[in-house]
Image (cartoon, grey):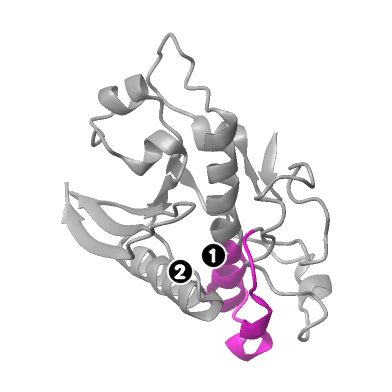
Amino acid sequence: MKLSPHFTLGELTKTKHVTADGNIPSRVAIENLIRVCGWLEALRARYNRLYVWNVEGGMWNENSHVALCAGVRPQSKVCAGVRPQSKVAGDCTLAPDPGAAPDPGAAAASRKEEPIVINSGYRSPEVNRLAGGATNSNHLTGCAVDIRCAGKEQMIRYAAILLDIADGTKQEFDEMLLEQHGSVCWLHFAVRPKDNRRKISFLKA
């Protein structure tokens, strides 16, 4: 099941921990994952544009970021497989309207895209316990992902892009935790349906 053009339910529920519940999210958790995937799609698009394809940021129309599901225009009735009556489907686009600015899409078709890799997304209570997660973790509701980073520089670039997206869309996130364990780095990013705190921290695990 695709949650967005580049992210699937499988990769956002994968875990090395085998549990009786199978780490299967509820429909509410899936809608929360779809919301997070809107941000991930915008992060992926801008990271590739700026650092992989080296296209000037001026080609990106900031005013066209208006909702929460990348790659779908605001007037679209269906978003990432969600029924039109879903509240999530009505919140569609952190991505730019393709007609709003010069779109490198056609030329980019032959370009190599660097994916955003997810280490952990939704966790059932048992998976979260085995993973050592906090008892009130956003992972439990499908509101959080841990994004794999090649190193500190990439982690900081990801964080900067997500902050720009939040500012440009006037939408908030709940947590952005820049985490490191030895030489391994990852970015914990969470978005709640409401009551987002914009919490930013550097953590050494």
Quarter residue 47 falls in: bottom right
User: Residue 103: x, y in percent?
Assistant: 78, 79
Taking the image as shown, residue 61 lies to the left or right of residue 52, namely: right
Taking the image as shown, residue 134 lies to the left or right of residue 155, namely: left
Task: Please determine whether, in this image, residue 5 is positioned above or below residue 52.
Answer: above
Amino acid type shown at disc 2 = Leu
Q: Residue at x 73, y 47 (%)?
A: 80
Front one among 112 and 169: 169
User: Residue 39: x, y in percent?
Assistant: 55, 60
> Is residue 42 at all visible to an observer of this figure?
yes
The kind of secondary structure the magenta stretch mainly shows is helix
> Is residue 183 at all visible to an observer of this figure?
no
- Identify the secondary structure beneath mark 2: helix
Give the labeled residue for mark 1.
43
Mark 1 surroundings within 10 Å by alpha-carbon count, few (fewer than 14), some (14 through 19), many (20 or more): many
Disc 2 to disc 1, how far (Cα)? 6 Å
Q: Quadrant of the N terminus?
A: top right
Q: Residue at x 45, y 45 (%)?
A: 143
Q: Tell me, for residue 162, which label it has, or none.
A: 2
Q: Which residues are magenta?
A: 42-68
Front one among 56 and 18: 18
Residue 54 in magenta stretch: yes
Task: Please determine whether, in this image, residue 95 is positioned above or below residue 120.
Answer: below
Q: Residue at x 37, y 58 (%)?
A: 174
Asked if the residue under mark 1 is in contact with the one under mark 2, i.e. CB atoms within 8 Å, the reply is yes
Mark 2 surroundings within 10 Å by alpha-carbon count, few (fewer than 14), some (14 through 19), many (20 or more): many
Amino acid type shown at disc 1 = Leu
User: Residue 158: x, y in percent?
Assistant: 43, 66
Residue at the top extreme, as displayed = 20
